[in-house]
Image: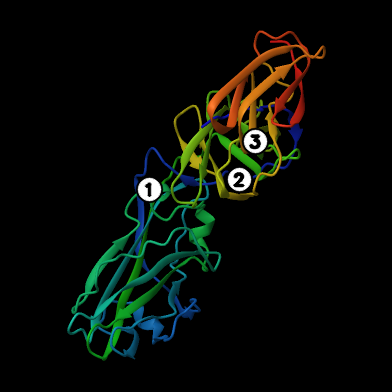
Amino acid sequence: MKSYLALTPVLLLAVLCNPYSEATAQSCTSTVGANNGGSFSTMAYGGSTFTWSNPSNAQNADGSYAIAGATLAILSTAWSNYLVVQNFGFSIPSTATICEIIVDIQRSETGLALGADVKDRSVRLLQNGALYGNDLASGSSWPSSDGTVTYGNALLASTWGGSWQPSDVNNSNFGVAISTQLSTNLVSLALQGKVNQIKVTIIYDPNSLLSVSLGKFSATVSPNEDGHLLTWTANATAGGNFIIQRSGNSSDWQEIATVPMASSGHDPSASGSMTSYSYTDHDPLDGANFYRLHMVDASGRSAYSTINEVTMKNQTTIRCWPNPCVQTINVSSPQPVTRITLKDLMGRTLYMRQTAAPTGDWQIPAGNLPPGVYFVLVGSQTLRVLKEAN
């Protein structure tokens, strides 16, 4: 994969935003909980055919249950809407970094026989009252007597994902949502999934104020459609890095570039000037591209930005970048070709490469070329390229 950096630090006067706090924290020493929920309800879930009764019974482990059940024909599968538990009563300090959100669900089933099954359909968190982050549904069957399963018992980046600030979990709309799935085999059965209690524990770093304050982060198709342009502003101290990560599914991330932090000359915890950064991903994935920033300051503390999505359209024209160029000219053609040529203004051939098998991606060395205008010939098309001094 090829990554090319277009970094232009510019000091801007802006309103300082709070740092994002989905963190790979260095000192996750403080624990609050496990807390019981205070608000109980249900929420629609696509394709569900039955609902939860008595949602408030999921507050305490007292043998009273929130129940979702149905009678299914043979060889059938159905699932419930969401049981939603919110208002866990947290008051995490605003300067903390959330390390882990641990959810304990005590549940069981009734009615199993002859290969039938009751298990998770979906287990999600709610941020500001809306489903958010990854689905951690387990594939294991629910037991016939109460058993507790723990979800999210690791750092956020590898579990729920997303960006979590103390204010998010302190909010009364923070919560947990679970849907149960029922399946029958060779006999029709009345099956039930039962939840006795849902509890949440928060593990956080109390002294992890990141020395980076991120402003607006955006990702769009670049103006000349030669890739995806990422831009962001930040108030930071020198010595850290912005590690740009990309994913095709918002779950599996790959590092594609590193952008050094430039000092803004201000305390990141106070209002002041921000530095502007940009990066162009010239080789995006086909289809959906998800981007986030892994911000690592000079002390080694880190946090993740929110996630931005850009969809790569089918390429219909030949792309050439960077333009102007310095060391290398990269060429991408939607129609693979077997030859590429570089000529100067006099029409002289300076570079020509031919391959036996057609290819759509080429690189032309340009470091030894004098500054000036050149032409790249790809099939029947000609592209103009400006070469700058090394």
Give the x, y percent position of residue 10. 73, 28
Give the x, y percent position of residue 240. 52, 27
Residue that numbered label 1 is attached to: 155
Closer to the camera, 141 or 1?
A: 1
Question: Which SS class for mark 3?
Answer: strand
Residue that numbered label 2 is attached to: 18
Give neighbour class at mark 1: few <14, some 14-19, many 20+ (Cα, 10 Å). many
Question: CA separation, marks 2 and 3?
Answer: 42 Å
Closer to the camera, 312 or 250?
A: 312
Tag of residue 63: none
- Kind of residue at disc 2: Asn
* Observer able to see residue 361: yes
Marks 3 and 1 close (CB-CB < 8 Å): no
Question: CA separation, marks 3 and 1?
Answer: 42 Å
User: Of label 3 and label 1, which has the lower sequence position?
Assistant: 1
Tag of residue 333: 3
